[in-house]
Image (cartoon, rainbow, N blue to C red):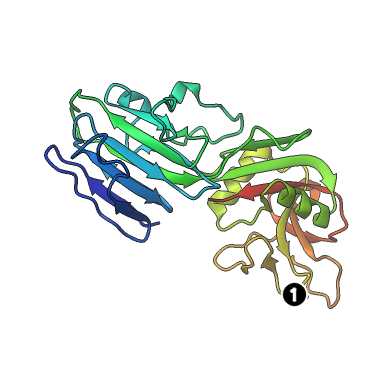
Amino acid sequence: MIRVVIAFYVLAIFLVSSGHGNVVPFRDNNIFPGCEGYMFVDDEVVIEGPFNEDCVLQFETQEDRILAFSVVDGDLIETASFLSIHDGIDSKAPVLLAENQKVLEVSNKDLPTTVYTTQSEAVIRFTNKKLTSNLKLKIQKAVRCAFNLGIDSQCGRVVDEVSCYCATFVNRIHPDQTMFCVDHNMKLVSFENRTEEELVQAAWGTEVSYWTSLTDTRRDGTWLWESSMTVPADYTNWYPKRPNTAVNNVDDCMAYGGATYLNFWGDIACTTMAHAICEAQP
């Protein structure tokens, strides 16, 4: 992931643009003349102090996403006397406080303290209190993450600060679990690496089976993550002697967990009833 770093100095603000963030003049230069900045956050940006006193910086991401603010190698809570992060660009936009953020029970406790907007725009206002050290603020595009997707489900920021994973504990066949995720603007999970899989499994366990998006329904023997339309490349976790290589076998969908496959991948009939994991990525 490419990071864009902008240094804001006492006498001037140097604005840098790249493929991940386009910096243009602030939309209303009459409000804070000489101390304004605007950036569109397409992925992630890091702004590095020291910062101008009484400055205002505006950030925006795509309309159906939100913004996540954290501190690199530090604690966001400790910045409260130096800056305020506002949920929106209106002059009366509320201040986002770490202690007021909703806590999702299964979220990864090792993630940095992060505050989230409820919309696609935000403003940072710096106070006139001087920083005792350089500060690096990280601003990321993120997806919304609810407490759950209804009865018998649970959600959390399990892997990182910007994605969302939800488990549904209702047994359904594979096609129905796929549609359940889609109906909630998510996709059936696909595992890109061992770390992602281990974090998801740690959140909800492996005592029962969970559907993923990996299938070979399009071509027998060619396994494809349906959610991302990619083939497993650098990482697989098949149970020994799986998947089934018999011609025209009906074990066309991958689930993990349960008494047979435990934390490994197993190919089973798509008509099998199982729980599922949905995911949403920014």
Q: Where 69 falls versus 45 (above or below)?
A: above
Q: Is residue 13 left or right of residue 146?
A: left
Q: Is residue 27 left or right of residue 119?
A: left
Q: Where 28 falls versus 173 (above or below)?
A: above
Q: Residue at 25% across / 37% down in the picture?
A: 30
Q: Where 223 falls versus 107 (above or below)?
A: below
Rendering coords of residue 150 (x, y %): 75, 35
Judge whether residue 91 can be spotted in this image: yes
Q: Where 151 falls versus 23 (above or below)?
A: above
Q: Quadrant of residue 248?
A: bottom right
Furthest toward the front, the residue is: 30
Between 251 and 154, the residue placed more toward the observer is: 154
Rendering coords of residue 165 (x, y %): 62, 43
Q: How many numbered marks, from 0 up? A: 1
Between 39 and 34, the residue placed more toward the observer is: 34
Q: Residue at 38% across / 28% down in the picture?
A: 91
Amino acid tagged 1: Gly
Q: Is the residue marked by circle 1 packed among few (<14), some (14-19), or many (20+) residues within 10 Å?
A: some
Judge whether residue 240 can be spotted in this image: no
Q: Residue at 51% across / 26% down in the picture?
A: 101
Quadrant location of the N terminus in the rendered image: bottom left
Rendering coords of residue 197 (x, y %): 60, 50
Q: Is residue 250 left or right of residue 123?
A: right
Between 20 and 212, the residue placed more toward the observer is: 20
Residue under label 1: 221
Between 201 and 153, the residue placed more toward the observer is: 153
SS category of the residue bearing label 1: loop
Rendering coords of residue 67 (x, y %): 46, 41
